[in-house]
Image (cartoon, coloured by chain):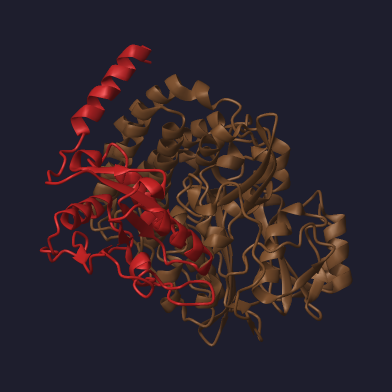
C-alpha cells in the first residue's frame, strides 16, 4: 500500500489530468436550481453527475445553488406528479425576476412515459411556457451542459443529434 | 423448519404459490415468524399475498382471499409488511385488520382518484383529498436524487421520531402496466428506477419466462449477467461518490465520478446506452452481440481506477464510522438486502440462485458493523468481485448449464440481485397481457427501518447518512 501523501498526490494529479475543458461562452454567470418532480431519478442523477468534477459546469459559466431564491434558471426533472405541483409552484414563485424554466429530460418536457394520470400532470409542456427543453431519457451530462450553453447564448438548436439539441421554446 | 400443515391444506396455484384460508393464513403467520423471512407484501381487491424466503433461498408466495375489502394484517407478525399494506390500501382500497400502521403511504391527497386501481375508483372532489403532514425536510429538498420527505423531532441536538414519506414520487406505474402486453410493458419497466435500469427489467423478464415456461440461450443468460455486473459497478461508484461528497472527501468523490463517467463512455463505445437503459430484451437479444470485448474493456478500464479509489478511500473512511448504523438483527428481521444487508451481517446474495452463476468469482465476505463505513467497504469489495465475475464470464462465455424445466402456469416470480439489493417481480398473464404485476424493490424493507436507523443522528449528518444507504425511492413509490 502506498503512503497516504503519495496516494493523495497521485489522485490529485489524475483528477487534474482528467478535468475537462470548459465550454466558453459570453455573458454573466447563470445560477441553476434543480427540482425533481417524480421520475425514475435518471435525469436527477445525471444532473448530480453534471455538478461533479467530471464536467466543467462552473467553468462554463453556471453555478448550482441550493435555494430557488438564489436561482436564475429552474431545471426541472420528472413528469410533475400532482403531489409535486405545489413544490414546483413554490420554487418558481421564490425565484427572482428574470427567471427561466428548463425541462431536463423527456419526462419533464411532456411526461415521457408518464402522461396525465390520476397521479401525474404529464410534464411542464402542458402547464407552463418553457424556456428550454433538453430531450433524452435520460440526457447525458454532456448533452445537458451543451444545451444549457446553447440556451444561455440564445441560439436555436443547430445540431441534429437528439442528445445534444436544446429546443428553445419561448422566453419569459 | 416451517410449519407446513396449513400449507398442505391450501391450494397450489403456481410454482411457489399457495392459496390458504383466512385461518390457514393466520396460523402460518403466527407459527413461522422466526423461520421465514418476509420479502414483500401486496394486496389487491381479490388476494392478499406475502412473499417469503425459506431456507435455501427458496421463495414462497402465500395468498389469502380479501373478503369485503379486508384481510388479516401481516405486519402484526412481520413488521416489514407495513409499507405494502399501506400501499395496498391507497391503491386498491383494501384494509388490513390489526395493521401496525394504517396511515397513507402513497395517496397524499393530491390524486384525482381514490383507490385508483380498484374496480370502482372514486373521483376526488374539487379541493383534493386529505394531505399528509408536512415534513421538516420536504421531499424535493432531501439530498437523494429522488423524492423522499423526512420528518423528525429535534431532541438534544439529534433526530428522534423520524418519519419518512415517498408519496410525492408516485407516478402510477402499476396502473400503466396492467393490461399491457409484456412487449409494451418493457420500456416502462426499464424506467421504473435508475437504481435498476438493468435489475428491474431483468427480474421482470425472468418472471415472464417462468410464467411462459421459456428457456433462454446460455449466451443470452451471460449477456444479462454481464450487464447486471456493469450496472452494479456504475451504481456503486455513484453511491461511493455521493457518500464521499457528503463526507467532504472531494478528491475521492472526483475519482469515483470520473470512473463512473468512463464506464458510461465504454458502454456507449460498444453500442449500449450510457447507463444501460433498454439494454435488457424480452426476445433474448440483451446488450450487444459483441459483449465480450465490452466486458473486457470495462475490466481494463476500471481495475486500476478501483485500486486507486480503494487506496484513497482508506484515508477518509474514519468520517463514516458509526454513521447510520443498521444493526444485524434489524437486517435479518426486515430482510434487508444488497450492500446494506451484507454490511450488517445478513450475507445473502440472490446471484447465487442465478442460472450460470460463477460462484468461484464471488468470494467476498460480508461485514457486520452496519455503518456507513461498512457499507462503503462492502461496495468496494463487491465492485472488485464484479470485475472478477466479468473475467469469469468472458473466459467461459455461453457455457451450458443445467436448466430446470418448469410447466407453463401464466404466473411467474423473477428476481435479480441489483446493486442495491434483490429486485423481485411477480406477474400473472391472461391472454398474453399482464393481468397483475407486483414489484418488490430493495428499498421497500429499508423504508420500514429508516426511521430507526436515522434516530440519534445529528440533522447535519442526514445527507451523508442517506447517501451511504444508497436510497432510490422511485422503485417503491412507483
**Residue placed at 71% from the left, 41% from the top?**
B330
Relative to A136, residue B261 above or below: above
- Could you tell me residue A51's position as x and y percent? 32, 42
Whether residue B138 sits left or right of residue B65 in the image: it is left
Relative to A56, residue B83 above or below: below
Report the front residue among B139 and B196.
B139
Q: Chain A is drawn in which colour?
A: red
Residue B321 visible in this rendered orientation of the protein:
yes
**Residue placed at 14% from the left, 64% from the top?**
A157
Residue B227 visible in this rendered orientation of the protein:
no
Relative to B306, residue B54 above or below: below
Report the front residue among B167 and B31.
B167
- Could you tell me residue B19's position as x and y percent? 76, 73
**Residue placed at 22% from the left, 61% from the top?**
A163
Name the image quarter holding the C terminus of chain B: bottom right
Report the front residue among B121 and B198.
B121
Whether residue A57 sits left or right of residue B445 in the image: it is left
Quadrant of residue B47 in the image?
Answer: bottom right
Q: Colour of chain B?
A: brown
Quadrant of residue B309 in the image?
Answer: top left
**Number of numbered markers:** 0
Report the front residue among B198 and B212.
B198
Whether residue B108 sits left or right of residue B277 in the image: it is right
- Could you tell me residue B232's position as x and y percent? 43, 46
Whether residue A19 sits left or right of residue B364 in the image: it is left
Amino acid at each position: 500500500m502506498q503512503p497516504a501523501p503519495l496516494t493523495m498526490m497521485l489522485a490529485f494529479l489524475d483528477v487534474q489530468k482528467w478535468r475537462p475543458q470548459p465550454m466558453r461562452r459570453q455573458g454573466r454567470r447563470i445560477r441553476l436550481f434543480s427540482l425533481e418532480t417524480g421520475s425514475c431519478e435518471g435525469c436527477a442523477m445525471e444532473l448530480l453527475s453534471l455538478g461533479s468534477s467530471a464536467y466543467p459546469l462552473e467553468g462554463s459559466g453556471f453555478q448550482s445553488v441550493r435555494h430557488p431564491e438564489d436561482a436564475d434558471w429552474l431545471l426541472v426533472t420528472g413528469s410533475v406528479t400532482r403531489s409535486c405541483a405545489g413544490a414546483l409552484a413554490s420554487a418558481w414563485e421564490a425565484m427572482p425576476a428574470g427567471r427561466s424554466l428548463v425541462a431536463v429530460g423527456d419526462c419533464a418536457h411532456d411526461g415521457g412515459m408518464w402522461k396525465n394520470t390520476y397521479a401525474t400532470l404529464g410534464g411542464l409542456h402542458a402547464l407552463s411556457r418553457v424556456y428550454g427543453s433538453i430531450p433524452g431519457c435520460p440526457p447525458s451530462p454532456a448533452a445537458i451542459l451543451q444545451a444549457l450553453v446553447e440556451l444561455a447564448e440564445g441560439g436555436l438548436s443547430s445540431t441534429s443529434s437528439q442528445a445534444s439539441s436544446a429546443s428553445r421554446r419561448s422566453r419569459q | 423448519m416451517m410449519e407446513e400443515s396449513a400449507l398442505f391444506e391450501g391450494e397450489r396455484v403456481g410454482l411457489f404459490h399457495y392459496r390458504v384460508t383466512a385461518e390457514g393464513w393466520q396460523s402460518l403467520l403466527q407459527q413461522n415468524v422466526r423461520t421465514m423471512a418476509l420479502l414483500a407484501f401486496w394486496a389487491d381487491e381479490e388476494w392478499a399475498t406475502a412473499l417469503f424466503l425459506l431456507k435455501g433461498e427458496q421463495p414462497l408466495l402465500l395468498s389469502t382471499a380479501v373478503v369485503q375489502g379486508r384481510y388479516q394484517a401481516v405486519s402484526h407478525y412481520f413488521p416489514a409488511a407495513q409499507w405494502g399494506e399501506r400501499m395496498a390500501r391507497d391503491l386498491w382500497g383494501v384494509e388490513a385488520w390489526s395493521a401496525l400502521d394504517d396511515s397513507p403511504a402513497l395517496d397524499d391527497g393530491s390524486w384525482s382518484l381514490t383507490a385508483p386501481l380498484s374496480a370502482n375508483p372514486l373521483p376526488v372532489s374539487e379541493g383534493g383529498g386529505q394531505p399528509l403532514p408536512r415534513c421538516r425536510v420536504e421531499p424535493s429538498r432531501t439530498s437523494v436524487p429522488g423524492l423522499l420527505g423526512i420528518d423528525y423531532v429535534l431532541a438534544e441536538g439529534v433526530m428522534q421520531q423520524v418519519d419518512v414519506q415517498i408519496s410525492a414520487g408516485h407516478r402510477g406505474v402499476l396502473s400503466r402496466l396492467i393490461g399491457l402486453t409484456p412487449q409494451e410493458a418493457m420500456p416502462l419497466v426499464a424506467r421504473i428506477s435508475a437504481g435498476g435500469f438493468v435489475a428491474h427489467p431483468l427480474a421482470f423478464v425472468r418472471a415472464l419466462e417462468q410464467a411462459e415456461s421459456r428457456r433462454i440461450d446460455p449466451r443470452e443468460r451471460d449477456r444479462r449477467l454481464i450487464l447486471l455486473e456493469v450496472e452494479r459497478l456504475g451504481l456503486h461508484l455513484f453511491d461511493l461518490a455521493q457518500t464521499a461528497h457528503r463526507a467532504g472527501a472531494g478528491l475521492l468523490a472526483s475519482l469515483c465520478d470520473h470512473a463512473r463517467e468512463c464506464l458510461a463512455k465504454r458502454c456507449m463505445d460498444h453500442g449500449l446506452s450510457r447507463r444501460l437503459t433498454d439494454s435488457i430484451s424480452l426476445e433474448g437479444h440483451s446488450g450487444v452481440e459483441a459483449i465480450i470485448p465490452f466486458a473486457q474493456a470495462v475490466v481494463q478500464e476500471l481495475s486500476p481506477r478501483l485500486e486507486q479509489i480503494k487506496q484513497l478511500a482508506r484515508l477518509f473512511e474514519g468520517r463514516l464510522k458509526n454513521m447510520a448504523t443498521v444493526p444485524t438483527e434489524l437486517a435479518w428481521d426486515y430482510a434487508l438486502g444488497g450492500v446494506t444487508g451484507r454490511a450488517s451481517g445478513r450475507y445473502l446474495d440472490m446471484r447465487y440462485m442465478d442460472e450460470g452463476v460463477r460462484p468461484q468469482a464471488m468470494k467476498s465476505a460480508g461485514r457486520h458493523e452496519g455503518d456507513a463505513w461498512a457499507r462503503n467497504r462492502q461496495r468496494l469489495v463487491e465492485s472488485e468481485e464484479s470485475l472478477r465475475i466479468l473475467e469469469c464470464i468472458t473466459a467461459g462465455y455461453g457455457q451450458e448449464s443445467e436448466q430446470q424445466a418448469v410447466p407453463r402456469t401464466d404466473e411467474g416470480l423473477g428476481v435479480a440481485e441489483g446493486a442495491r439489493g434483490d429486485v423481485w417481480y411477480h406477474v400473472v398473464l391472461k391472454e398474453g397481457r399482464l393481468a397483475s404485476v407486483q414489484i418488490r424493490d430493495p428499498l421497500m424493507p429499508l423504508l420500514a427501518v429508516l426511521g430507526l436507523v436515522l434516530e440519534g443522528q445529528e440533522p447535519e449528518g442526514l445527507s451523508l447518512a442517506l447517501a451511504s444507504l444508497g436510497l432510490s425511492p422511485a422503485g417503491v413509490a412507483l
